[in-house]
Amino acid sequence: MLLDSASLYFRAFYGVPDRRATPDAMPNNAIRGFFDMIATLVTEYSPTELVACWDNDWRPAFRVEAIPSYKAHRMVDGTDGVEESPDDLTPQVPVIVDVLSSIGITRLGVDGYEADDIIGTLAVGAHGRAQVDVVTGDRDLFQLVDDAQSVRVLYTARGGVRDPDLVDQAFLERKYAVATGAAYADMAVLRGDSSDGLPGVTGIGEKTAATLINRYGDLATLRAAIGDGDPLLKGAQRKRLEAAEAYLDAAPAVVEVVKNITLPTEFSAALPQTIAEPGRLRELTVQHDLTTPVSRLLKALQLA
């Protein structure tokens, strides 16, 4: 089970009520919600391995170099690469890190890469070895779906972790009219994504993008057909695709997750067999009023 951690703690922040005892107390709603989510997931799906994947770099240089608008609208004005974050969420993230560490749940990030790239690398590394469940509220990771390799996405955007959409290839076919995760990535390049600052090809929406990828098989073959003057591509559609040549050169490097990051040699995804730092966990639990979510999670992990 691979957690898109930021996706989950942002969801927790906005979805869990802020119930501080006093106005000057530090908020803990994202912390409580995040660990409640993990407890629910572990209880429901019984993973044998679990990794909280982390954005060591939320806007990697290689993606910005390819498309400068990538996530640019999310930056704090007047800063160089600082991501906007609600004031009440920011101090909660280090506590999430500390609680993960004190319990012994593996948190993994690699400098220069996003959590998506960690997830992609781990998912591919598990091909043929285990069922992989990717937990996220981000459609970008649909590209990893692969029935043959037992990779699916638990998509939390609508039903949360209690009732996620189980995204497999049949789901992609029903929802987006594309047959594979790879086809979804190619469709996403054409469609674009305003939430990530990706413009897409002007005038090419989701349905048209899916039709084109299905007709040609993949983006590379579509681009070859454009260059070869395929008569099926004509009129305004051809002009739009030709005008987007530079974008189509750059966008795959932004949209496609990296699947071959070098991971730390000491990395292990195994569930903790004992609490890593019991004293520190007790301290954090008391300090941040986390008794209920931590107890739930320890019970789910069979550590209590």
Image (cartoon, rainbow, N blue to C red):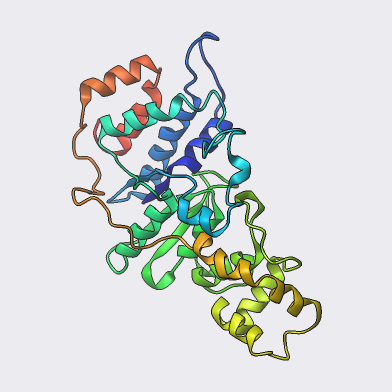
Q: Would residue 91 be found to the left or right of residue 183 on screen?
A: left
Residue 253: tell me if it is visible: yes
> Which of 56 and 270 lies nearest the eye of the viewer?
56
Q: Residue at x 72, y 88 (%)?
A: 232
Residue 298 at x, y percent in the picture: 30, 32
Q: Residue at x 21, y 31 (%)?
A: 275
Q: Is residue 6 left or right of residue 172?
A: left
User: Which image quarter is the C terminus in?
Assistant: top left
Give the total number of marks visible in the rendering: 0
Q: Position of residue 224 (x, y in %)?
A: 59, 85
Above or below, comparing residue 195 to residue 122 in the picture? above
Q: Residue at x 19, y 39 (%)?
A: 273
Name the one closer to the observer, 137 or 249: 249
Q: Residue at x 55, y 24 (%)?
A: 87
- Residue 182 lies, in percent from the top left, at 50, 71
Residue 166 visible: no
* Residue that extends furthest to the right in the rendered view of this protein: 235
- The vertical placement of 74 against 257, above or below, is above
The residue closer to the viewer here, 177 or 69, is 69
